[in-house]
Amino acid sequence: MNAGMIVALVVVAGLVLAGLWLWNRQREQAALREHFGPEYDRTVQELGNPSQAADELAARRRRVEKLDIRPLTREEFDRFSLRWRDAQAHFVDDPKDAIGQADTLITQLMGVRGYPVADFEQRAADISVDHPHVVEHYRAAHATHSSWGAREGTTEEFRQAMVHYRALFDELLVREEARDQVA
């Protein structure tokens, strides 16, 4: 075998390896896109390219796999359900305070389930792994709630925030009850 033939084989092998790497990368991105849904698109837009978004979402998944996320006990489920009903009932008399209660309740529920709760962005990122289709509800509710500092929200803003919090609350609470009944 001459030197030219060896170089050609090395080049072909390199191209095959590069092609396999690219194919695998695209397959991984497609799997992440399917799992994360709209969160994948939001992350691509935020980070600027699909490759960085895929790395970020894969890192989130690895982080959450290390957490000790657990279902609620029946007592915890009942306690959180009652507190949510109280927050909803309070909405008629004081919507702004009820939204604050809902935000606090979601954070406490996440903590009991095993999610770290120190930072909102980290909470949202962690929730996006197991609940990618409701994380936008959480972001929308939190953004609306956070913007009320110096101004008063409208009735429609309050209502929308409560609907957004409810979507995440249902996912974190009711979904676990259904699992308990099946098991």
Image (cartoon, helix red, strand yellow):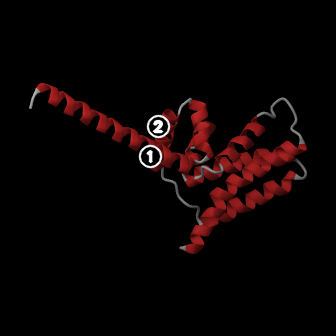
First-in-chain label (1 vs 2): 1
- Residue at 34 percent across and 41 percent down: it is 20
* 53 sits to left or right of 99: left
Q: Amino acid at mark 1?
A: Arg
Q: Which residue is mark 1?
A: 27
Residue 159, x across and y down, in percent: 84, 48
Q: Which mark is residue 59?
A: none
Is residue 76 at least partly visible in the picture?
A: no
Image quadrant containing the N terminus: top left
Image: 159 above or below 183: above
Residue 60 position, x and y percent, is 50, 42
Count residues near mark 2 (Cα–Cα under 10 Å), then give few for <14, some for 14-19, many for 20+: some
Q: Amino acid at mark 2?
A: Asp
**Pointers 1 and 2 in contact (CB under 8 A)?**
no
Number of the label disc, if any, that sits on residue 55: 2
Quarter occupied by residue 173: bottom right
